[in-house]
Image (cartoon, rainbow, N blue to C red):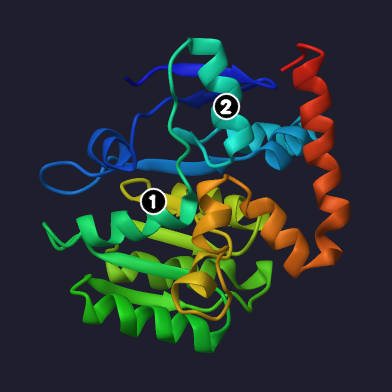
Amino acid sequence: MTKDVSVGGISISCFSSIAEVISTRILTEESVNPGVGIAINPEKVITAANNPEIRDVINKATLRYPDGIGVSYVMSKKVGEPVARIPGCELWEHLMLASRKNEVPVFLVGASEKVICNTNQKLSAQGVNIVGYHNGYFNDADNSEIIDKIKDSKAKLITVALGSPRQELFIFECQKVIPEAFYMGVGGTYDVFTGNVKRAPWLFRKAHCEWLFRLLSQPTRLTRQINLFTYIRLYLLGKL
């Protein structure tokens, strides 16, 4: 099904399932397809529209997939057939498990020391080939040291949980030194994976209302949700 659709000026790939993303764009028979994967949701579309630097960073990715239901819905309307929503946290978990087949070396970056250690332990227990990890509490001045650590590990699959746009900026800096790897920005995925942060209950996920659960759990996110209403307005005006 792979085709690209423009949403708010961002070219995003259509997929029918998470398995298709992994098998066609990330993993190969032997290792990985070098590149960068970035999840796209309505908030990111609006942020990119208002910030040329962020838009340029997003457009440098080799894989842009629809993380938010608002994005996959607009894409479905444009192509005239269903486009699967690809939740970043689910893609990451499936990718970690799929990487076991060829023992692809994985490096983890981000989150607190406790969360990254627990993530490492849980993945290792599942048979994932973790070759290194580093928490997210470092400054830009430390980037070179951490990138050297990643390079020495010979990782081919590098997932980074620093929040946007910091994780993307780190990824592209790292890619200059290690171009043969696949990188994926994963936001708060490690926290959800280890149970440090509760994911939306099944009913919210089934109704595509995870954003509402997060808002109810963290009212401080209200200002961020303004972008969602802006996105809806642009869609209704035919400007996406």
Classify mark 2: helix, strand or loop.
helix
Mark 2 neighbour class, 10 Å CA radius: few under 14, some 14 to 19, many 20 or more:
some
Residue type at mark 1? Leu
Determine whether, in the image, residue 109 is placed left or right of residue 150.
Answer: right
Residue 26, horizontal then vertical, whole percent: 30, 42
Task: Please give the name of the residue rendered at 66% of the width and 32% of the height, measured from the top-left corner.
Answer: 56
Residue 139 in sight here: yes
Residue 185, which numbered label? none
Determine whether, in the image, residue 105 is placed left or right of residue 101.
Answer: right
Residue type at mark 2? Tyr
Task: Please give the name of the residue rendered at 45% of the width and 79% of the height, measured from the top-left corner.
Answer: 194
Mark 1 sits on what residue? Answer: 91
Q: Nearer the viewer, residue 25 or 53?
A: 25
Which quarter shows the N terminus?
top left
Mark 2 sits on what residue? Answer: 73
Tag 2 near tag 1, CB within 8 Å: no
Classify mark 1: helix, strand or loop.
helix
Q: Earlier in the sequence, mark 2 or mark 1?
A: 2
Which quarter shows the C terminus?
top right
Determine whether, in the image, residue 61 is placed left or right of residue 230.
Answer: left
Q: Nearer the viewer, residue 107 or 150?
A: 107
